[in-house]
Image: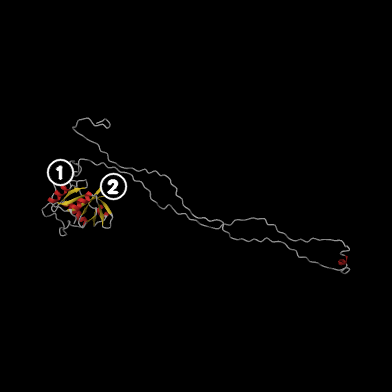
């Protein structure tokens, strides 16, 4: 069971509500105490975009780990919880019973107390302290020690919030801010592929061949003996081998170059156009007189 001191530390240190697997559900907003026992019974958690929505989570089965409170419910369960009206800083018995039924739990630390709203006592829950800086020891001890809470919310701060629980004497103005970053994602693939093409190569190669040529020589004293060696009148044939060159083509594969894929980073600028919301605060005074303080006039 979570003690009131632990609940006060959660608010003071701006703790978070997380599930048992370590996933963050949201940040702690308020802690509600039981009217009879004074024990922390509920915690409201800020969920949704920018934490604009609050959901009730029972502290039954919850435990504190550092500045966080671990609950036995996941984020989807908490986000889908029934929305109840707690603008008076008090959780009515019917509202609490609806939440207990949704989460399937009973009151904190009492497994036999399944409803607790038919005894004739006011078993609703008061918001003992909220995450607005009101975590002083005196205020918490007074609230927890008596086990009850004063419904006059003017005692909690000087301001009076007409739209909900009292806070302090100031109003918070919020605005949305655009956070632009980059992330790396796949843009496609580049593939290096090799294939075969055929082209014609033309070269001129000189070739030679032998041709028959008749050579005649007159009879001289030098060749007269060879000329008279044969018969007087005869038939005779002589042969000679003729040769020629023929073109021979041979091909060989030789390496020409090395090709690889490389990457380079190219930076370009892109313009982001987004709408953001912000709050404006105007004054609406009635029955007041005086001169407004103009900035820069020395006053």
* Dot 1: element: helix
Estimate the x, y position of residue 35 in percent, counting from the top left: 14, 51
Task: Please state which of the two labelled residues, at mark 1 or mark 2, is closer to the viewer.
Answer: 1
Q: Which residue is disc 1 drawn over?
A: 155
Quadrant of the drawing holding the N terminus: bottom left
Q: Which residue position holds label 2? A: 50
Q: Considering the numbered disc 2 on the image, is that residue within a helix, a strand or a loop?
A: helix
Of residues 7 and 58, the one nearer the viewer is 7
Q: Is residue 239 above or below residue 174?
A: below
Is 106 positioned to the left or the right of 20 in the image? Answer: left
| Cα–Cα gap, marks 1 and 2 | 30 Å
Q: Residue at x 15, y 43 (%)?
A: 155
Q: Is residue 257 left or right of residue 113?
A: right
> How far from the left and from the top, in percent, is residue 41?
18, 53
Q: Earlier in the sequence, mark 1 or mark 2?
A: 2
Residue 103 in which image quadrant: bottom left
């Amino acid at each position: 069971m979570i003690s009131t001191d632990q609940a006060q530390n959660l608010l003071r240190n701006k703790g978070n509500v997380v599930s048992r697997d370590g996933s963050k559900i949201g940040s702690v907003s308020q802690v509600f105490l039981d009217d009879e026992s004074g024990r922390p019974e509920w915690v409201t958690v800020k969920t949704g975009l920018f934490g604009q929505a609050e959901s009730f989570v029972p502290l039954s089965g919850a435990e504190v780990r550092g500045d966080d409170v671990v609950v036995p419910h996941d984020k989807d369960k908490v986000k889908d919880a029934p929305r109840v009206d707690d603008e008076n800083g008090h959780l009515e018995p019917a509202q609490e019973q609806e939440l207990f039924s949704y989460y399937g739990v009973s009151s904190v630390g009492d497994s036999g107390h399944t409803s607790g709203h038919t005894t004739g006592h006011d078993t609703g829950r008061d918001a003992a302290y909220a995450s607005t800086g009101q975590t002083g020891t005196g205020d918490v001890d007074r609230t927890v020690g008596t086990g009850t809470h004063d419904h006059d919310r003017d005692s909690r701060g000087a301001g009076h919030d007409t739209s909900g629980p009292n806070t302090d004497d100031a109003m918070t103005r919020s605005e949305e801010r655009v956070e632009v970053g980059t992330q790396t994602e796949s843009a496609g693939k580049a593939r290096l592929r090799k294939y075969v093409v055929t082209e014609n190569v033309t070269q001129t190669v000189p070739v030679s061949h032998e041709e028959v040529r008749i050579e005649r020589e007159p009879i001289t004293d030098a060749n007269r003996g060879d000329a008279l060696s044969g018969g007087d009148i005869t038939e005779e044939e002589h042969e000679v081998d003729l040769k020629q060159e023929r073109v021979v083509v041979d091909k060989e594969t030789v390496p020409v170059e090395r090709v690889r894929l490389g990457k380079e980073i190219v930076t370009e600028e892109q313009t982001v156009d987004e709408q953001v919301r912000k709050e404006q605060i105007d004054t609406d005074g009635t029955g007041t007189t005086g001169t407004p303080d103009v900035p820069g006039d020395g006053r």
